[in-house]
Each structure stands twice: as structure tokens, then as C-alpha cells.
Image (cartoon, coloured by chain):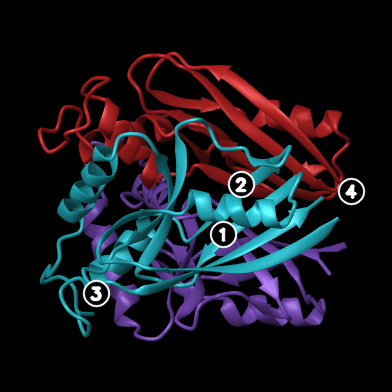
Chain colours: A cyan, B red, C purple
Amino acid sequence: MRQAFHTLELRTRGRGIYPVTDEVASWLAREHADAGLLTLLIQHTSASLLIQENADPTVRSDLERFFARLVRDGDPMFEHDAEGPDDMPSHVRAALTQTHLAIPVREGRMTLGTWQGIYVYEHRTSGHRRRVALHYLGE
Amino acid sequence: MRQAFHTLELRTRGRGIYPVTDEVASWLAREHADAGLLTLLIQHTSASLLIQENADPTVRSDLERFFARLVRDGDPMFEHDAEGPDDMPSHVRAALTQTHLAIPVREGRMTLGTWQGIYVYEHRTSGHRRRVALHYLGE
Amino acid sequence: MRQAFHTLELRTRGRGIYPVTDEVASWLAREHADAGLLTLLIQHTSASLLIQENADPTVRSDLERFFARLVRDGDPMFEHDAEGPDDMPSHVRAALTQTHLAIPVREGRMTLGTWQGIYVYEHRTSGHRRRVALHYLGE
């Protein structure tokens, strides 16, 4: 049993859902990860992680539209707005989605379903540099 | 330290919350899992996983009623409706709940609280065959 | 590779978001956890776990205000109210946030971002004794 650590870095171009499945799979291949457990942790509270449909891009735009309506930018209820009208909504969206994911790895592949992909969900309207800690424990 | 993998399959009868605690516990018993970490990953994006109250079934019907109101089937905001009015709402519900769970195992038992059970949440109105990847890492 | 288990207990003073980062870090230090995976599981269905902003306390009060509006206490839609108007809303809030968290540990520290803290989110209006199962697997 062994471990490996990595930090995946990406620069977002503002609010939206960014695929990272291929980068994660490449890292696992470089580490010769055959059977074990993969954990991802996004090191931010205004961006989050999602496993979602990887085929039709309207799933991602619909999801964003849903969250934009559920958590309104500039809602006067929010006190925390030092970084703008999208500041607190970003924290709420992150609380409603995932900060970490765990994915078993079997026969050298993540055990995702056919239609599943891994995404970083940027909640801020402007682009940010985002870091995701990766951890593998297995054989 | 050792690992075990399994795929739990179930056929749902449409939208609703289905208990799987006993099947998961049986698998752990068959594997003689004594102390370690259990991970569950549902391999779909229109069904999800939940740890919820296992005593009063109205908790599950109330939860469903809440989600039905929060994410309306056939909402004209959604573009992605190839599989019907419940298609995109299913993806949103999945994003708001869990695609994976991790549960420590201690002295041969999952460390769930007395009132906690593990559930598969089917979000589609018609029944589907669902697969949950199980992974155990421990002693 | 080795494992350690612990149960973190805290008594809440009613609805609100309680920091536990320091207690979790202390336990990891006592266990000389150097590199591995930490899992937390809250053993209740009316309280949950969150990784959130650790700097400005208005993030937590805004988050609570958002959830209070999204899931109304005493909503007549809810049947399950044996323990009062906050009973079912607590289960819904728990379903919308996290029952478990997984955090890689590297060089003796949790791989949290600078602004991230770990919180127990009490959803009941009165105080409760809450238990969080901790599990460490690593070196």
C-alpha cells in the first residue's frame, strides 16, 4: 500500500463549470495507480467540485442557471460583500455542492459511470487561480 | 492493510429514496471488514446517495416534497430536456445531494449513528437500474 | 500504513455553525499523523459538516440566513414535526450540506486552503450533544 500527493492547478475564466477528468486521469496513470482510493479537495470556499454529466454541455449551463436563481448575486440579505455582489453567493453555492470528492480506482481506472465527469465549479464572476489537492492511497 | 471492491446493483421503481444499509453491511460482513474505510460512489448523474433518518418514513417523503418544490419538473428555464421534464431536475437534485459517501468501519461495523441509514435517491420519475461502486480499505 | 479512530464530542448551544478545526488538528498531532487520509462523519441527521470560510464570521451568519429562508421552519408541507417546527427542516438542511468530509494530510497538516475551516452545523434551534467519528489512515 502506498500514497501519492499532487496539486492540480487551474486558472478559471470566471463563473462556470470546468472539466478536470482528463488531468486527474493523467496523474493517476503517471502514478501507476492500479487499485485504491482517490480523494480530491478544492482549497477554496468560493469554488467547489462536482461529478456531473459529461455529454451535453446544456446540463452545465442549466445547472448554472439554477444556482444563479437560487442564490441571487447582490441579495440584500447578505452582509458579507467585501469582494462584491458575487462574494457571499459563492460561499453559499460552495456549501450546496462539494468541497471534496472520493473515487475508488479499480484496474487502473476511476470507477466513474459512463456519463460522469469531474468538474471544478467556479462561483466568482471573475477568473481565479484554483488549487485542488489530490491524494491517492492504494496499490 | 487490504482492499475489496464490489458493485451493488438495484432496480428502482421511480422517484424516491431506497434503503441500502443492510446490503452494504452484508457485503462488509462477507469481506470480514473489521477496521477501515468504506467508500460508496453512485455511477449515475440522475440518482444520488444520502445518509438520512432511518426511523420515520415521513422524513423521506417530506424530503422528496421539498426537492420537488425546489427543482420543478418541466421548469422552462431548463434547456436539457431530451429525456423529459424530469431530466434536468434529476441532475440538479444530484448536484445538491451526494454522489459519494465515506464511512469509517470500526469493530466490524459502520460508524453510523443510531438513526442513520444509507439511501439511494432515485430522481427520475421512471424506474432505472442503478449501480453503486463499493470500496473497502482496511484490516 | 496504520489507522486511528476517535470520537469528537461537542455540545452545541442551538442553531449555528461551530468551528472544530483546532480540535481535529490536535487529534492528528497527538496521533503523529504525517501523511494520509482523514475522514469525518457526523453521527446525526439534524446536524451536518461544512468546510467554510474561517475569517469573517458574517459568512456563517449569512449562510444560516440563506438556509433559514430556503427551508422554512414550520412549513406546512412537512408532515414530520414530532420534535417541533425545526425538526424536518433540520433533516433537509443536513441533506443539502455534508454528513462526511475527507481531507488528505500531508507533512503533518490537513491540506486545507488558507481560508478554510471545518465546522459542525447545528440545525436544531435547541442545543444538542453531537458526535463526529474521526478516522485516520496513513503513515
> Which amino acid lies under the numbered mark 1 shown in the image of this protein?
Leu
Report the disc number at residue B27. Answer: none
C-alpha gap between disc 1 and disc 4: 24 Å
Where in the figure is residue C91, as x and y percent of width and height?
42, 47
Q: Callout 2: helix, strand or loop?
A: strand
The reply to whether label 2 and label 4 mark residues of one chain is no
Q: Which residue is mark 3?
A: A87
Sooner in the amino-acid sequence: mark 1 or mark 3: 1
Q: Is A103 situated above or below A1?
A: above
| Contact? badges 2 and 4 (CB < 8 Å) | no
Q: Position of residue A137 (x, y in %)?
A: 75, 56
Amino acid type of the residue that numbered disc 3 sits on in the rendered structure? Asp
User: Label 4 belongs to which residue?
Assistant: B139
In the displayed structure, B139 sits above or below C42; it is above
The mark closer to the camera, 3 or 2, is: 2
Tell me whether the residue at label 1 lies in contact with that at label 4, contact meaning CB atoms closer than 8 angstroms. Answer: no
Between circles 1 and 4, the one closer to the viewer is 1
Asked whether disc 1 touches disc 3, contact meaning CB atoms under 8 Å apart, the reply is no
Q: Viewer-nearest of labels 1 and 3?
A: 1
> Do the numbered discs 1 and 2 sit on residues whose CB atoms are within 8 Å?
yes
Amino acid residing under circle 4? Glu
Residue under circle 2? A103
Crowding near pointer 2: few (<14 within 10 Å), some, many (20+)?
Answer: many
Per the model, the C-alpha gap separating discs 2 and 4 is 20 Å
Chain of residue at mark 4: B
Residue depicted at x 78% and y 77% = C34
Cα separation, mark 3 vs mark 2, equals 30 Å
- Label 3 neighbourhood size at 10 Å, few (<14), some (14-19), many (20+)? many
**Disc with the residue nearer the chain's start (1 vs 2):** 1
The CA span between labels 1 and 2 is 9 Å
